[in-house]
Amino acid sequence: MLYDCRSLADRDRGIAAAIEAVRNGELVVLPTDTVYGIGADAFTPYAVKALLDAKGAAHVPPPVLIGSRHTLDGLTYTLPPAARDLVEAFWPGALTILVKHSASLRWDLGDDSGTVAVRMPLHPVALEVLRETGPMAVASANKTGKPAALTADQARDQLAYSVRAYLEAGPAVDPVPSTIVDLTGDEPVLVREGAIDLARLRDVVPQLRESQEV
């Protein structure tokens, strides 16, 4: 079902429906500060698999969205200083960080490398859902090879009944992909330059290098 979160009453119903769906292991579509995302409980393996099946994607581990900076500490064993500096500067926002997750976490995102891509989006609807559900595996709300959805209605055209609740909040304002920084090695590496450019990142972490640099 699609809920128009631009209406206060529908927003409340939609957010409640999305939270219930995630807790039941079902899929939801929600707005972020980039494009719309399709999400599932990160700790429910069959829900993560359903997400990847809905997209028609190879089983590439999806990023994880969180609703609070403090949640990051619960997902990782240790965080390098560069990670904390970047999070402090750019979260919530369009920055995804690759970090080593805690070995004790009971999740299966389809990867056994011990790393996870994490982001805290700058969107009130997404944050309200995430603060109740906890970490969610979230990928762009489109079929693989198709254009990214800029509205929940566009996502519904592609994903149909595989999703329990669609949260519509109007067209995506800034559909530029998030910037990705790898913080799992000895030095931070820019994997993808997106909404946050290299110069701004280096203002915070001067030692950041681009992936193609030797």
Image (cartoon, helix red, strand yellow):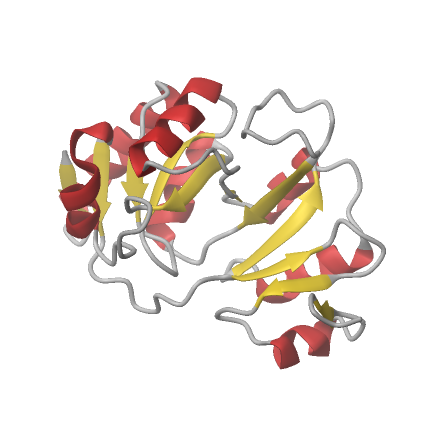
Residue 14: image location, x then y, percent: 22, 37
From this view, report whether residue 51 is shown above or below residue 83.
above
From this view, report whether residue 10 is shown above or below residue 146.
above
Residue 100 falls left or right of residue 150: right
Residue 87 falls left or right of residue 188: left
Residue at image coords 66%, 29%:
112
The residue lying toward the viewer, choosing from 57 and 23, is 57
Residue 172: image location, x then y, percent: 28, 62
Residue 135 falls left or right of residue 87: left
Residue at image coords 52%, 58%:
92
Quadrant where the image shows the N terminus: top left
Q: Quadrant of residue 78?
A: top right
Residue 56: image location, x then y, percent: 33, 36
Quadrant where the image shows the C terminus: bottom right
Residue at image coords 55%, 45%:
68
Q: Quadrant of residue 83?
A: bottom right
Residue 58: image location, x then y, percent: 44, 36
